[in-house]
Image: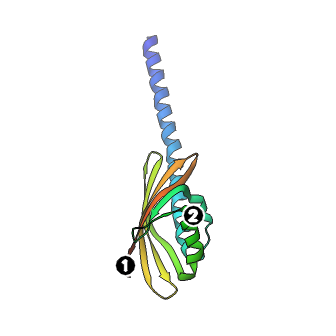
Amino acid sequence: MKKAIFCTLTSLLVFSAAVHAQTRTKPNRDSTEAYIRESEAQWAESVATGDTTAIERILADDFIGTDPDGKLYDKAFMISDTKNGAKDWASNHLDQVKIRFFGNTAVAQGSESWVKRNGERGRFVWTDTWVLRNGRWQIVAAEDLIAAPLSAK
């Protein structure tokens, strides 16, 4: 009888711990996804504003990106390019982003619509790899492509 009660209590404790862990993880996952989505939007906007605040926060120090021409660039280049490149861009806005989690890694795939000051329009289609390090989510890798603008529906 004592063994049956002990097994029942143990099962209840294990079940309670599992439920507690799931309820704690879900809000954390939701807030992390919101943070990544908002950070991606801020990075997109920075192309036209030249404000590097978001870039300095979200790119890891060992970040490596691949531009649409296949060239590699680092965090320092991205900061400099954003400050200097804003004169060429009228706007750049996040269109969509899909975020998937793999433990302490998240892969964000999305697109942005842009307009250059000369009137040229287009889209960036990209994949960013986010990693949780020392309690902070940061991008460690990015790959960008240029695509035709989305057609009006």
What amino acid is labelled 2 in the image?
Ala
Q: Position of residue 36 (x, y in %)?
A: 52, 58
Q: Nearer the viewer, residue 139 or 1?
A: 139
Q: Quadrant of residue 4?
A: top left
Q: How dense is the environment of label 2, judged by Cα within 10 Å: few (below 14), some, or many (20 and up)? A: some
**Cα separation between marks 1 and 2:** 28 Å
Residue at image coords 39%, 79%: 149
- Residue extending farthest top: 1
- Quadrant for the N terminus, please: top left
Q: Nearer the viewer, residue 62 or 26?
A: 62
Q: Which residue is mark 1?
A: 148
What amino acid is labelled 1 in the image?
Ala
- From the viewer's perspective, is 87 left or right of 6? right
- Residue extending farthest bottom: 118
Q: Nearer the viewer, residue 130 or 13?
A: 130
If you read the primary sequence from the N terminus, does the residue marked by circle 1 or circle 2 appear first? 2
Q: Which mark is residue 68?
A: none
Q: Which residue is mark 2?
A: 76
Q: Position of residue 77 (x, y in %)?
A: 54, 67
Residue at image coords 55%, 77%: 85
Q: Is residue 143 above or below residue 7?
A: below
Mark nearer the viewer, 1 or 2: 2
Q: Position of residue 135 (x, y in %)?
A: 58, 46
Q: Is residue 35 above or below residue 82?
A: above
Q: How dense is the environment of label 1, judged by Cα within 10 Å: few (below 14), some, or many (20 and up)? A: few
Q: Name the element at disc 2.
A: helix
| Cβ–Cβ under 8 Å for marks 1 and 2 | no
Q: Is residue 72 above or below residue 5?
A: below
Residue at image coords 54%, 67%: 78
